[in-house]
Structures are given as structure tokens and as C-alpha cells.
Image (tube, grey):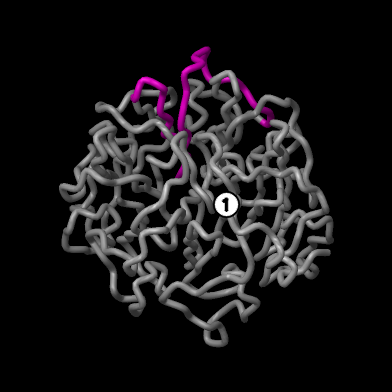
């Protein structure tokens, strides 16, 4: 198996590639080239996850810049539990992390008090010009050479290493390990994603692969809930374009090359957008439209743009995170439009548990949903015991019109990151 030291031999940068919507990533691109700029963060700061070199109590209720560099390219926007670790990449292919535990990939102890806590960006060895996603306990990433790497917890075989995954033999990894020997995995941000106990990654030929535990039918391979795979298994089809699995098992959304949208999972809170019905353990097309663009999933809710700049949402509505101004528990079981004209790529919408952020076509940043630890960025006083800071309609964050991309870390962390010119 290829070790971490060998990764230094790989190409540090990749040329321009095409745009798509999709999952959390290490390197973001759009039609004009690489998305890069200043890195800003706000919200909770447990174990230093905001990257501001400050103790965990230093929450931020408005965006604060991380250092002075202008070549940041990525931040985590997985829709599952953050588990107190953040990642950010630069345009030279370096990957940086803060927080604690083996999810950082630094080959260090996993839990306090033995774990090393890091509140300022620490470089993960190697060249990481590829794509990336994570859930609360596992990271999956690709490199510019098309190889696939994983680290963290191996429960249910989610590391994809074809190893035993019983309760006493999880074979967790605290540094990156290569999955197989294939070199045709995606290097595109919107084609790699983690669910709660499973993972997806596309290959460069448009095939989609899954592994781990079929929690809530989330793997999409047509198998029962207790089905497990410890190595990648193909989901039928060869025309997949994007994948996002941020719904904690209740919701997985993929787009095909023809612009059609496909969903599967448990369908709790009507999260599949199919006007109710039973769980779906294989992909089912949502409607007949073929103009879908960027896809974001989080907290059993979906946010999807169309090519005309409209933004649509459905699923769990807790804390008003769907953005329709409705009561917080009024779930929506089919797509409904959020007013406004929005940027259409995936990197312009993020959903973390019960909070949402999105960028409009004019470059302004808007947030809504839960804001009790400052994660809406609206410069409010923070009180975890009060719902006063929740908003069910979009509110503008500051006055800047230079926002480029937004992402977040959910559940345990509750913070957002964003790129700005």
C-alpha cells in the first residue's frame, strides 16, 4: 500500500477543469478556473475549529479572516457531524487542519487528554490537489493522480480498505491510507461525498461507487438496511455527474449529465422531495426537469439551484432552515422556491444541521435557520438556551459583494467558512 511519504512525489497542482455542483471538496473549480481567495470563518470554535489560533470558547458571530493569505481554495462543507476538525486547502495543493483527534490525519492520539489540540492551521503532509469529503468520523480524499485515500474510523468498513469491521476489529486509521490501486477516481469536488456511515466517490468515466453500511438505504445499491461493503461497490449507471450525501442517511441527491436529479434514502420528513412515500434504496428521479445545477444536502434537507439562478429547497424544516418564512416544524416534501436570484454552483450554498448559508448572483452572502452560537454571522449576542437568534427567511451577512463560495461544518461544530475576493 502506498504510504504518506510517497505522496510527496505527486503533482502539486492540476490545471483548469470544468464546473459542477456537489459534495464537500479539497479543490474547488468553476468554468473560469480555480476558485481561490481569502478564508473567513464564524460560529462555534470548540477545540479551535475556526482556525483563528484562539481557545475553544472564542465563538464568532460575524465573519473573521483566517490569516492574510489569498490563495485558500477550500473548506469542509460536509452535512454530517463535524467532530471538531476543520480542513482548508491552498492552490499549491497543501492541506491544512485544526481541531483534535485521528480525523485530522496527523497520526496522533484520538481523544483528550492525550490528543494534541491545534487551533491554528497545521499542514497535513503530502500533495492533495484533488477532492475531499467527510462525516463525523471518516475522511475520504482523492489526489491529482486519481488515487483514493481514507482515514479515521473504519466502523462498518467505511474506509473502503476491504478489512474486517467488527466491534473489536475496526482497524481505524489516524493517517491517510490508499484505497486499492486504481488511478481513475475523480479529482472534481462535486463527485465525492460521505453519508453518516457510508461514502460515495465517482470515477472519471461517470460511474458512481459506494461502500460502508447501508444506513437508512443510503448507499443506493438496492440492498436492505443492514447491508455492508468494506470496498467500493458500483451503483448502476455510467452518466452520473454529481453526488451529495449530507443528509445523515435520510437523503442522498445525485445529478446526471443530462441535468436530471435523482434521490434515495430513508425519506424522513419528506426529505426525498417525492411528496412522501416509503424509503428508496436505489436512485429514483425527482420530477422530469433537466435544468438542475448545484446540489447541497444537510440535516435531512436539500437545497438545489437551477440554471436560471433559482434556488429550491425541501425536507426537514427545523429552526426555519428551509428559508421559506414558515413555522420551524413545517416540513416540505417537494421542491419549493426560495425567493431571489442565486449563484448556481454547489459551492454557493451550504447547510449545516439547522443553519443555511447561500450566495446570491450579486456576490452578497445570506444566512437563515438556527443561530444560537453565532453561526448565522449576523453579529448577534449568542445564547444556546434561546431561539431568539433563529430566522426562517434569508438575512444578509454584512455588506460585501465579493463572496465566492461558502461551506460549513455541522452538528457538533456549527460553524461556516467562506471564500472572499
Q: Is residue 336 left or right of residue 203?
A: left
Residue 365: image location, x then y, percent: 26, 44
Q: Is residue 310 left or right of residue 142?
A: left
Residue 364: image location, x then y, percent: 23, 41
Residue extending furthest toward the top: 288
Residue 382: image location, x then y, percent: 21, 63
- Predominant SS along the magenta part: strand
Element on which disc 1 rests: strand
Task: Reply yes or no: does residue 301 show up in magenta.
Answer: yes
Q: Is residue 151 left or right of residue 408?
A: right
Which quadrant of the rendered structure holds the N terminus? bottom right
Q: Bounds of the magenta span?
A: 281-309
- Along the viewing direction, whichever of 33 and 161 lies nearer the viewer: 33
- Along the viewing direction, whichever of 72 and 258 lies nearer the viewer: 72
Q: Quadrant of residue 149?
A: bottom right
Say if 197 sits above or below 206 in the image. Answer: below
For the point 80% across and 68% down, the residue is 169
- Along the viewing direction, whichever of 262 and 316 lies nearer the viewer: 262
For the point 48% across and 55% down, the residue is 76
Residue 106: image location, x then y, percent: 61, 75
Residue 300 appearing in the image: no
For the point 35% across and 52% down, the residue is 419
Residue wearing tag 1: 133
- Along the viewing direction, whichever of 29 and 343 lies nearer the viewer: 29
Q: Quadrant of residue 10?
A: bottom right
Residue extending furthest toward the bottom: 114
Say if 362 sits above or below 139 in the image. Answer: above
For the point 43% across and 42% down, the residue is 347
Mark 1 crowd level (few <14, some 14–19, many ≥20, 10 Å Cα) = many
Number of numbered callouts drawn: 1
Task: Reply yes or no: does residue 135 show up in magenta.
Answer: no
Residue 16 appearing in the image: yes
Amino acid at each position: 500500500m502506498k504510504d504518506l511519504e510517497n505522496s510527496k512525489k505527486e503533482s502539486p497542482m492540476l490545471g483548469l477543469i470544468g464546473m459542477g455542483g456537489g459534495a464537500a471538496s479539497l479543490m474547488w473549480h468553476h468554468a473560469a478556473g480555480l476558485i481561490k481567495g481569502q478564508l473567513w470563518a464564524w460560529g462555534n470554535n470548540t477545540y479551535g475549529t475556526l482556525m483563528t489560533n484562539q481557545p475553544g470558547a472564542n465563538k464568532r458571530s460575524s465573519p473573521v479572516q483566517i490569516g492574510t493569505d489569498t490563495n485558500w481554495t477550500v473548506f469542509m462543507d460536509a452535512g454530517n457531524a463535524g467532530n471538531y476538525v476543520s480542513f482548508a486547502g491552498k492552490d499549491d495543493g497543501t492541506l491544512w487542519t485544526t481541531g483534535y483527534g485521528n480525523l485530522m490525519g496527523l497520526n496522533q492520539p484520538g481523544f483528550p487528554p492525550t490528543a494534541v489540540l491545534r487551533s491554528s492551521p497545521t499542514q497535513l503532509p503530502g500533495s492533495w490537489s484533488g477532492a475531499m469529503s467527510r462525516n463525523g468520523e471518516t475522511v475520504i480524499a482523492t489526489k491529482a493522480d486519481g488515487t483514493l485515500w481514507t482515514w479515521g474510523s473504519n466502523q462498518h468498513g467505511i474506509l473502503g480498505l476491504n478489512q474486517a469491521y467488527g466491534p473489536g476489529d475496526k482497524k481505524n486509521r489516524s493517517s491517510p491510507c490508499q484505497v486499492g490501486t486504481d488511478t481513475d477516481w475523480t479529482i472534481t469536488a462535486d463527485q465525492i461525498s460521505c453519508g453518516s456511515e457510508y461514502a460515495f466517490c465517482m470515477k472519471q468515466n461517470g460511474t458512481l461507487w459506494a461502500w460502508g453500511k447501508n444506513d437508512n438505504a443510503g448507499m443506493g445499491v438496492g440492498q436492505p438496511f443492514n447491508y455492508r461493503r468494506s470496498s467500493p461497490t458500483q451503483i448502476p449507471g455510467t452518466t452520473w455527474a454529481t453526488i451529495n450525501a449530507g443528509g445523515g442517511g435520510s437523503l442522498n441527491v445525485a445529478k446526471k449529465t443530462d441535468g436530471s436529479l435523482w434521490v434515495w434514502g430513508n425519506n424522513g420528513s419528506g426529505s426525498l422531495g417525492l411528496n412522501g412515500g416509503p424509503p428508496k434504496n436505489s436512485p429514483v428521479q425527482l420530477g422530469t426537469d433537466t435544468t438542475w445545477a448545484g446540489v447541497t444536502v444537510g440535516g435531512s434537507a436539500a437545497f438545489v439551484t437551477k440554471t436560471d439562478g433559482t434556488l429550491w429547497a425541501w425536507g426537514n424544516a427545523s429552526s426555519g432552515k428551509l428559508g421559506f418564512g414558515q413555522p420551524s416544524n413545517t416540513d416540505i416534501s417537494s421542491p419549493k422556491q426560495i425567493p431571489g436570484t442565486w449563484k448556481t454552483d454547489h459551492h454557493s450554498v451550504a447547510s449545516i444541521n439547522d443553519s443555511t448559508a447561500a450566495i446570491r448572483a450579486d456576490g452578497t452572502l445570506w444566512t437563515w435557520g438556527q443561530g444560537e452560537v453565532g453561526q448565522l454571522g449576523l453579529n448577534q449576542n449568542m445564547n444556546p438556551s434561546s431561539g431568539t437568534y433563529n430566522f426562517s427567511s434569508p438575512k444578509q451577512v454584512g455588506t460585501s459583494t465579493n463572496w465566492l463560495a461558502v461551506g460549513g461544518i455541522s452538528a457538533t461544530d456549527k460553524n461556516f467558512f467562506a471564500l472572499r475576493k
